[in-house]
Image (cartoon, coloured by chain):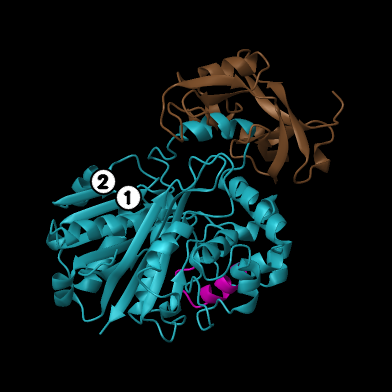
Chain colours: A brown, B cyan
Amino acid sequence: MAEASALKKSLPKINKVDAPYWQAAAAGKLVLQKCRDCGKVQFFPRVACVDCFSGALDWVEAKGAGKIHSFTWVRVPRNPAFKEDAPICYINVMLDEGVIVESRLVGDSKDKVKMGDRVRVVFQETHSPEIKLPMFELMGSPR
Amino acid sequence: MRRKKVCLVSYGSTEYSRKSEESVLTHYANAIRQALERARLHKKEVRGLSITTQASPDFSPHVAEQLGLEVDWVLNGDYGGAGGVMSVRRAADAIECGHLEVAVLVGGNSFDKSVAHQRPLEYQRANYVDVYGYGGPNSLMALIQRLHMENYGTTLEQIGKIAVAQRANAINNPQALFREPMSMQDYLKSRMISDPIRLFDCVMPCSGAECVILASEEKAKKITDKLVYLVTDAEISHYQVADMQPDKTTFGTKVVGERIFSEVRREDIDLLEIYDDYPIAVMIQIEDLGFCKKGDGGKFVDARDLTYNGDFPVNTGGGELSVGQAGLAGGFLHIVEALRQLRGEAEGHQVKQAERALVTGIGWLNYGRNLGTTAAIVIERRQ
């Protein structure tokens, strides 16, 4: 069982809480939760506002831009199915909306990454036709 | 908060192995048996059991049955690397309340392939981290280390000094898997894993178990004349959770330290057993505990001798970095070593003046921030 699943790159197990996020990603949009009561913007998707605990959370579209907050080059991915992609540039991005998201840096110029570099979101196809993963590339990368 | 009437009366450690497929239950039994024998306790006197592991799907009540223990108190001490310290806190609460007199706390790991091991990743790790091909905890700590180096000018040599000093401590510790000397060059040249994290920044997973026995003061006095008291303790889980722009280089240990040092003085601590899944985590905790300013951890370790006979003894048996990490027993290793030191039983790596020790635990690298659980205890030998 473990062996069979290990051969495939990990995909999100979409649940009731985060389904809207993944539907938006499949349509090429990066969305975040925004609290209707206190205005807090948060990520990852949750059932309550992390500030005021309100359950009234709207999905708002992010600009899809931010800067590299930190990064590492993964030589040994946890799931061996990712080995063909290694070294993987695993990143924390500080979105312009003021939230940190974890993701991967892609694109031809990724080797030049530095702290603070501006990045923009791209949506990467996966082996599931329904799922696209938000990743990032350096601004100024050829599209 | 100050504790009055709870003692740590015994400890047990199994051998560590990188290959053994012995069941985790056997490791538990071996560690518990050693701890009982050291305290000359019969297992019928044990009325509480706490289990900390990721290597078995069985919960603590099932394990109590498997070990043949009838108990008044049972706990899954399931708090990642802080599991040891946090279990001590839970057991101390129960003892102070009078629910029981003697509690056995055990943490362990095994490579027993006949038992379902890895629990599934939590939702946020599965859906928002693992999908990007991350490299496990090594990658998440690498993000933190890079920020510390970038923001504060911390050097690899300063971080490496912690790993090198701990190896020097391990040389005379028979339990340690790594006892050959390590130089700064060895550290710097070790293979890159998830940069800036290198091989010698990482712990070696192994199998084994660690056990600690707690007792009420009254019972403790009947068990041993080496009385080691729990003095004060604190924890915080998910520090900065509502902050979407958290400071990744400050752990909840900052809050824990403020609470701890409202009860005892920093200068009265003789030795520190600091949870060391990575050397950078040790440096950050030294800062967060207030031994130096945030960002000055590099300069602090430059100026101090961290070995067991130095002026700031840290991880005196080698820590997880040199002894090995038997899964969540890693959070117990530090408590056991502190206890060994305060009882004067750390042969070959004994701190000369060892009356008071600070032990920390940290666990669960979390989404976008740093650590899920952070905790600490201070224990003290009294004549």
Quarter of image, res B97: bottom left
- Percent across and percent down for residue A77 are 63, 40
Q: Which residue is mark 2?
A: B60
Q: Which mark is residue B54?
A: none
Q: Are marks 2 and 1 in contact (CB under 8 Å)?
A: yes
Res A25 visible: yes
Mark drawn on residue B77:
1
Of badges 2 and 1, the one in the foreground is 1
Q: Which residues are magenta?
A: B163-176
Q: Is residue A74 visible?
A: no
Chain on which label 1 sits: B
Q: State whether discs 2 and 1 lie on one chain.
A: yes
Q: Could you give the CA–CA distance between mark 2 and mark 1, rounded to whole angstroms?
A: 9 Å
- In this rendered view, identify the residue nearer to me: B263 or B283: B263
Q: Position of residue A92 (x, y in %)?
A: 65, 40
Residue at (45, 18) in percent of width and height: A16
Name the element at disc 1. loop
Secondary structure of the residue carrying numbered label 2: helix
